[in-house]
Amino acid sequence: MKLVLAATGASGTIYLQRLLAQIDPTQHEIHLVLSKHAQQVAAQECDRLEIPAGVKEHAENDLNVPFVSGSARFDAMVIAPCSMASLGRIAAGTSDSALLRAADVFLKERRKLILVPRETPWSLIHARNVVTLLEAGAIVLPAIPSFYSRPQTVNDVADTVVWRILDQIGLPNPRAYRWKDQ
């Protein structure tokens, strides 16, 4: 699978970190793009984002990357976390960075685009932007953890969201908690 993983400036670097830890870059082609603000938030939240060997990093404004063109075949793009500002720019169709252009390409090519907003509360403008993106074909997966699995650590809590992201991409996640009849 060919994937683009990205992050913008919302709090929630842990979601990207746990996602990177659960996708094998020897089995999948992974491209990573962080906005300038995502880099600042990552430094504040986890000192240093651990990027597995084999993950291809790209600058936010490098428009010479393959995933900003509709002719390049990619399977899915995940923006986790996704700030409401970035979500709004994507909903408006602005493409003034590689990250935003890639999201625009995934929408126009009808490829899987998963946005993971973590901000709360939402304004009416946020809600309307979400509706616009849903209507355009994006998957909006708010970073809302579940507690059925009785998570014991912060990573366990974050993983409940990551498992849902992996489900949406179509990647197996054997550790994921699955609801069962009691």
Image (spheres, helix red, strand yellow):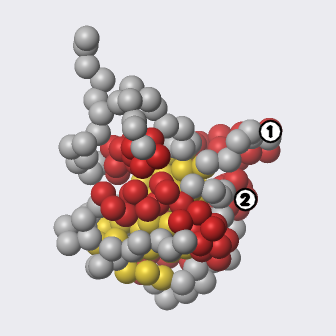
**At 50% across and 74% down in the image, what residue appears?**
48
Local secondary structure at mark 1 = helix
Q: Residues within 10 Å of mark 1 (few under 14, many from 20)?
A: few
Residue located beneath label 1 in the image: 124
Dot 2 crowding, Cα within 10 Å, few <14, some 14–19, many 20+: some
Q: Amino acid at mark 1?
A: Leu
What's the residue at 35%, 30% (across, down)? 149
Amino acid carrying label 2: it is: Ala
Please state if 44 lies on the left or on the right of 109 as rendered.
right
Q: Residue furthest right?
A: 124
Q: Which residue is mark 2?
A: 85
Q: Position of residue 82 (x, y in %)?
A: 60, 57
Q: Tell whether label 1 touches label 2 (CB within 8 Å).
A: no
Q: Quadrant of the N terminus?
A: bottom left
| Quarter of the figure with residue 180 | top left
Where's residue 114, x and y in %? 48, 52
- Quadrant position of residue 134: top right
Mark 2 vs 1, N-terminal side: 2
Residue 55 badge: none
Secondary element type, mark 2: helix
**Quick check: 64 above or below 124?**
below
Can residue 144 be seen at all in this image of the molecule?
yes
Quarter holding the C terminus is top left
Q: Residue 4, relative to residue 167: is it above or below?
A: below
Image coords of residue 167 (percent x, y): 33, 43
